[in-house]
């Protein structure tokens, strides 16, 4: 991990790499890892629309929580939205931050209205991958905790999280 540069790896439950990108580790505070990344290409996303090249993503991962939070900012620095994943807690090893994505996502608009996404995909994959009772329970508890943070505007959904 030279100069704080790391590789982020989002994996499926069977360990297959689903997505990878580079980011910079800008803060580590106990179980919290804060990364800074920029989109190097334009992305067209079915729910997020077009994410312009240069869009900044401040990413919050925990090694003991079953979710992560992405704070997307436009090139102007204004909040674009938050995108949250329910996942098995992240690990950081030899410059690679990995997490297992459990499909449930939460899209949070700048107004703090939110949408819970892909719950049906979670149910499908829970059968396909035979998620344990513990994994299913932890995912639901994480979703409840995440929604509470959003509704109360607690970290990282507040000004204390802005960089």
Image (tube, grey):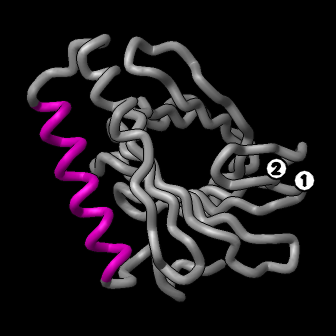
Under circle 1, the secondary element is loop
Under circle 2, the secondary element is loop
| Residue neighbourhood size for the residue with mark 2, other residues' Cα within 10 Å, grouped as few (<14), some (14–19), many (≥20) | some
Q: In the image, what residue occupies the spot 42% across and 40% down?
A: 118
Considering the whole magenta stretch, tell me its main secondary structure.
helix
**Would residue 73 appear left or right of 39 to someone viewing this image?**
left
Q: Are marks 1 and 2 in contact (CB under 8 Å)?
A: yes
Q: Position of residue 5 (x, y in %)?
A: 72, 44
> Which quadrant of the view contains residue 13?
top left
> Which quadrant of the view contains residue 136?
top left
> Which quadrant of the view contains residue 109?
bottom right
Please tell me which residue lies in front, 60 or 125: 125
- Can I make out residue 5 in this image? yes
Q: Is residue 81 above or below residue 151?
A: above
Q: Is residue 80 above or below residue 49?
A: below
Q: Where is residue 123 in the image (x, y as percent from the top left)?
A: 28, 28
Q: Position of residue 87 (x, y in %)?
A: 37, 39
Please tell me which residue lies in front, 52 or 47: 47
* On-image quarter of the N terminus: top right
- The numbered disc on residue 53 is 1
Magenta span includes 124: no
Q: In the image, what residue occupies the spot 75% across and 54% down?
A: 49
Q: Residue furthest bottom?
A: 159
| Residue neighbourhood size for the residue with mark 1, other residues' Cα within 10 Å, grouped as few (<14), some (14–19), many (≥20) | some
The mark nearer the N terminus, 1 or 2, is 2
Residue under pointer 2:
39
Q: How many marks do you count on the picture?
A: 2
Magenta-colored span: 134-151
**Would residue 56 appear left or right of 63 to someone viewing this image?**
right
- Can I make out residue 68 in this image? no
């Amino acid at each position: 991990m030279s100069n704080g540069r790391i590789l982020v790896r989002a994996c499926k439950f069977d360990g297959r790499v689903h997505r990878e990108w580079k980011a910079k580790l800008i803060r580590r505070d106990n179980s919290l890892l804060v990364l800074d990344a920029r989109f190097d290409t334009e992305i067209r996303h079915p729910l997020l629309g077009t994410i312009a090249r240069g869009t900044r993503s401040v990413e919050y991962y925990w090694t003991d929580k079953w979710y992560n939070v992405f704070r997307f900012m436009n090139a102007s620095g204004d909040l674009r939205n938050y995108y949250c994943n329910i996942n098995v807690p992240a690990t950081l090893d030899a410059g690679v931050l990995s997490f297992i994505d459990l499909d449930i996502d939460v899209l949070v608009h700048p107004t703090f209205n939110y949408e819970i996404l892909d719950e049906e995909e979670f149910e499908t994959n829970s059968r396909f991958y035979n998620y344990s009772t513990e994994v299913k329970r932890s995912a639901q508890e994480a979703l409840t905790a995440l929604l509470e943070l959003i509704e109360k505007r607690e970290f990282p959904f507040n000004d204390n999280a802005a960089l």
